[in-house]
Amino acid sequence: MEKFIKYLDQVRADEKLKEKTKAFILSTHTSQQRSATTAKSKSGRKGSYAVMKSVGLVASLVFCAVIGIGGYTYAKPVSYVSLDINPSVELGINALNRVVSSEGLNKDGQGLLQEIRLKNMLAENAVQALVQEIANKHYISEYGTSVIALTAQANDEQKAVQLQDRTRDRVQQVLREKNLECVVYADCVSLELRKQAKEQGFSPGKFRLIGILQALDPSITVEQYRNAGVSEIIVKAGELLASVDNGAAQSGEYERNRAMITATAQQIMNMEQNQNQNQNQVQNRNLPDNQVQEQNQIQEQNQIQNQTQTQAQDGQEQGTSDSGSQDPNANSNGTGGSTETGGNTGSQNGRR
Amino acid sequence: MSQLFIAEDISNAIEKYGDMVRRICFLGLRNNADVEDVFQEVFLQYFLNIDFFNNEQHQKAWLCRVAFNKCKDINKSHWRWKMVSINNLEIPCESAEQSNLMTAVLQLPAKYKEVIYLHYYEGWTIPEIAEITRQNPNTVYSQLKRAREKLRKGAGEI
């Protein structure tokens, strides 16, 4: 150990270091005298370390909180849009109107979602992309599906209606671009109904339509329509409405969708007729070019028909907003949240 | 305290304990800038607590403790811990054995270096070291034993 001691003996503080330290301490001392008493600044020095530490802690906590809350609000869907064509798809939309989750509600829908990425898109754009994809895959024309049911779901009625309108516009835009003839049935429901639908394994739009059917004909069970297409349900509803439509029992929940359903059912039936005609013509001629022309002509005709029907609908919607009455002819597509409870009791009364 | 008195007091302390603090820095640190920092910090702390000491022994023990702790603080920084390698010794050794020994000492963990220094260089007894480092004397015994074992392994004879 002597070697150790010997070696350490050689280690000495050089004069430069000593002088520097003296100067440093004296300068600290004078600056301390200027600022405050020794004791105070001593605690200040210690305190500053503690303060810095706690400031760092607080800052990191705030950072975490901001990231956490921000992430949560971003990732949490506040409203949903579901599309029922043949593929049923549901999109979760966050407070910033971006798609944060997507779920296929049947096999086709799941397959479809595997092929396109919708996350972080604006809701309208996502719906547009979806419909485009669906059109490209010929779900709309080939499978005879002639109804796109678009259902917006949000806690706030107004928000749901806004979402519904925006997305419906986009769907129609795509259909125009693709030159497809298709009925768009747009509706909005509350999140509560969505929950019920989910529990029973339905897409909310379909569940609501079935609910309407049940309101019209209490003998109908949910299970009966589990595998039915949306168009089928709407046609059925239209038929039921026509048969019930005797002026007496004309209030209730279904009433809000009445005009819409009647119009949609009418459209569907028109289109089915057209399709049959098309098929006949194809069989007769077997000429693809002509067929396309014919189709186009028929589509044009349909468009004209639809336009007139939509205009009629618009008129009815205006009637609702003006009067807010329960007149059967003046009801729109489910936008009158305020009348809902009244409507419910009304429908029950009506049925009895 | 007048400016003059303080200046005198500080320079006395630095003259008296400067070498000791420098040695502790030499054992604990591998970087001249750090040595300077710790040196200044230790004496600043001394100056700030100047009214607190009972006697010279207390003063010396306190300075040792503060110096070792400052070195530990500096070495705590992960960056330093990773970045700084063991350089060559700053003072040339007389023999290969001495060089081996010094390298072995410098490679010891901080707590063993502390005990080795306090015991062999400053000549404190183990109960005294226990008091300075605020540890159980038995802990100090075993630390010293382990330190010696390590040195024996690293440098042969001690």
Image (cartoon, coloured by chain):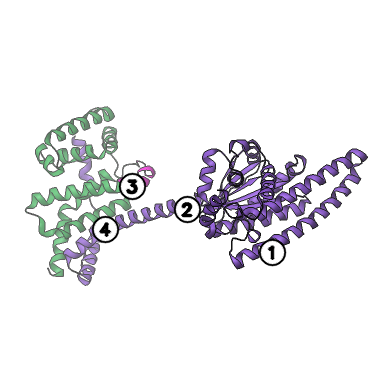
Chain colours: A purple, B green
Q: Dot 4 falls on which chain?
A: A
The picture places residue A130, in percent across and down from the top left corner, at: 67, 47
Q: Earlier in the sequence, mark 2 or mark 4?
A: 4
Disc 2 to disc 4, how far (Cα)? 60 Å
Image mark for residue B77: 3
Q: Amino acid at mark 4?
A: Lys
For marks 2 and 4, give the one nearer the viewer.
2
Instruction: Tell me whether marks 3 and 1 sit on the same chain.
Output: no
Residue under label 4: A16
The picture places residue A191, in percent across and down from the top left corner, at: 51, 50
Residue under label 2: A73
Query: Dots 2 and 1: beta carbons under 8 Å?
Result: no
Q: Amino acid at mark 3?
A: Ser
Residue A179 position (above or below residue B134): below
Determine the residue positioned at 33% across, 56% down.
A58
Task: Identify the image quadrant of residue A305.
Answer: bottom right
Residue under label 1: A315
Q: Dot 1 falls on which chain?
A: A
- The part of the chain drawn in magenta is B76-86
For marks 1 and 4, give the one nearer the viewer.
1
In the rendered structure, the answer to whether residue A1 lies left or right of residue B80 reads: left
Residue A336 position (above or below residue A2): below
Is B81 a magenta residue? yes
Foreground pick, A305 / A164: A305
Task: Identify the image quadrant of residue A273.
Answer: top right
Asked which secondary structure carries label 1, the reply is helix
> How many other residues sit within 10 Å of disc 4, few (<14), some (14-19) or many (≥20)?
few
> How many other residues sit within 10 Å of disc 1, few (<14), some (14-19) or many (≥20)?
some
Q: Amino acid at mark 1?
A: Gly
Q: Amino acid at mark 2?
A: Thr
Instruction: Tell me whether marks 3 and 2 sit on the same chain.
Output: no
Image mark for residue A64: none
